Amino acid sequence: MENIRWGRRIRAFRRLKRLSQVELAKEMNISVSILGQIEQGKRVPNEGQLEKISSVLDIQLGELIGEIKEGE
């Protein structure tokens, strides 16, 4: 269940930044298929992938995984 929540958050932030899956996957140096699996909650992103996603999307890691609410 946690994987699905993370995947939805990643997808939502990616869309807010107006990035396609192809663009984000390229920045992360992973395949679009892997990113799609992460966003669908079928694959657990490792710590390095989470850090890279937050860096590319220019958000704090805690915000990405739901520990920090916007504006805090």
Image (cartoon, rainbow, N blue to C red):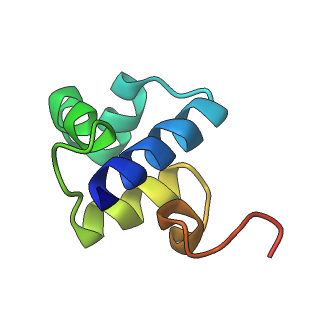
Residue 9 placement (x, y as % from top left)? 50, 48
Left or right, 51 with respect to 33, comes to right
Quarter of the image that includes the C terminus? bottom right
Quadrant hosting residue 52: bottom left
Residue furthest toward the front? 1
Pick the front one: 49 or 44: 44
Which residue is pictured at 16% across the width and 28% down the height? 33
Q: Please state the horizontal and vertical placement of residue 62, each as a whole percent of the image.
A: 54, 74
Q: Nearer the viewer, residue 22 or 8?
A: 8
Front in this rendered view, residue 39 or 50: 39
Residue at image location 26% in from the left, 37% down from the top: 35
Classify 48 as above or below 3: below
**Residue at coordinates 44% horizontally, 42% vertically from top-left?**
8
- The residue under the point 26% across, 44% down is 41
Residue 11 in the image: above or below residue 46: above
What x and y, as percent, mark residue 30?
20, 41
